Image (spheres, rainbow, N blue to C red):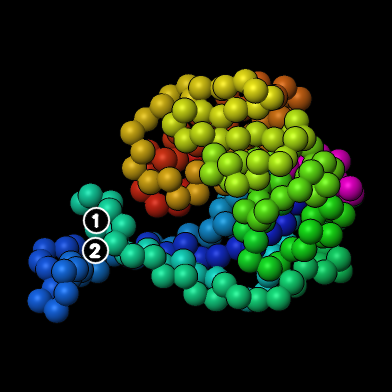
């Protein structure tokens, strides 16, 4: 199995803190950092999820050169997030077709596009990637059109993204619905193990990776969605951006 992941990556940084008093200067807590955890995020998290789910796969990734960092300040006991600071988000489109040094689209069994709409990929890039792919899935945060998504085998959107794209009529869209599960072709696939959510960071990346890996193995949409629901349920029950065990 050869898998290519394309899209923006970041460093997901979690600074876990103690909050024992309020500031005398403003009605905000004073936090004292206890520990810091860093993980690959965005397309980097999708890549790590695929590695965890398909450890024998041959993998490659294509991403931007500039660095994006998302730093979250989190109260350690409650896991309540006080603040998120994003750095390095603004850059021009950097995707170039000459970037395919390790694995080309034509060689890949699976192409995953994790598009966070930060400027790395253009609409034309998305359409061309879809056209050249054998089996593909798009997870995108941008405003989409039927023309952009029609070439992808599957498109994964969360509930708010689907609401923000009301004009999409293609039947290749999977909509994730949090603890309710996922919807595909007007069918609700309930989460097999709904759990109390501790942290949703990266859950969509897990769903995308789990679904497409299982679909490559089984060619069965129902089985693949159920598997992806299960794996996403596992990661939201743990802190931070994590991969399924």
Q: Which portion, as a residue range, is magenta? A: 130-137
Q: Nearer the viewer, residue 225 or 27?
A: 27
Q: Is residue 241 visible?
A: yes
- For the N terminus, the image quarter is top right
> Which label number is shown at residue 17?
2
Classify mark 1: helix, strand or loop.
loop
Q: Are marks 1 and 2 in contact (CB under 8 Å)?
A: yes
Q: Is residue 109 visible?
A: no
> Is residue 19 left or right of 82 when viewed as pictured?
left
Residue at horizontal 75 percent and vertical 30 percent from the top: 171
Q: Position of residue 122 (x, y in %)?
A: 77, 63
Vertical position of residue 240 compared to residue 25: above or below: above
Classify mark 2: helix, strand or loop.
strand
Task: Pick whichever of labels 1 and 2 is earlier in the sequence.
Answer: 2
Residue at horizontal 39 percent and vertical 65 percent from the top: 84
Q: Which residue is mark 1?
A: 76
């Amino acid at each position: 199995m050869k898998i290519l992941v394309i899209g923006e990556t970041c460093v997901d940084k979690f600074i876990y803190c103690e909050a024992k008093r309020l500031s005398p200067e403003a009605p905000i807590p004073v936090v004292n950092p206890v520990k810091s955890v860093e993980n690959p995020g965005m397309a980097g998290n999708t890549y790590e999820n695929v590695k965890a789910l398909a450890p024998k796969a041959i993998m490659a990734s294509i991403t931007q050169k500039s660095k994006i960092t998302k730093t979250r300040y989190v109260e350690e006991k409650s896991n309540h997030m006080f603040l998120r600071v994003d750095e390095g988000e603004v850059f021009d489109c950097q995707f170039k077709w000459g970037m395919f040094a390790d694995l080309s689209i034509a060689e890949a069994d699976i192409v995953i596009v994790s598009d966070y709409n930060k400027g790395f990929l253009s609409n034309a890039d998305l359409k061309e990637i879809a056209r050249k792919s054998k089996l593909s899935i798009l997870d995108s945060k941008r405003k989409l059109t039927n023309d952009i998504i029609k070439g992808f085998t599957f498109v994964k959107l969360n509930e708010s993204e689907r609401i923000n794209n009301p004009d999409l009529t293609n039947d290749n869209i999977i909509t994730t619905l949090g603890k309710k599960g996922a919807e595909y072709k007007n069918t609700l696939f309930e989460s097999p193990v709904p759990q109390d959510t501790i942290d949703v960071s990266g859950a969509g990346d897990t769903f995308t990776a789990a679904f497409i890996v299982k679909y490559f193995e089984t060619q069965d949409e129902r089985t693949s969605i159920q598997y992806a629901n299960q794996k996403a349920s596992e990661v939201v029950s743990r802190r931070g951006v994590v991969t399924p065990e």
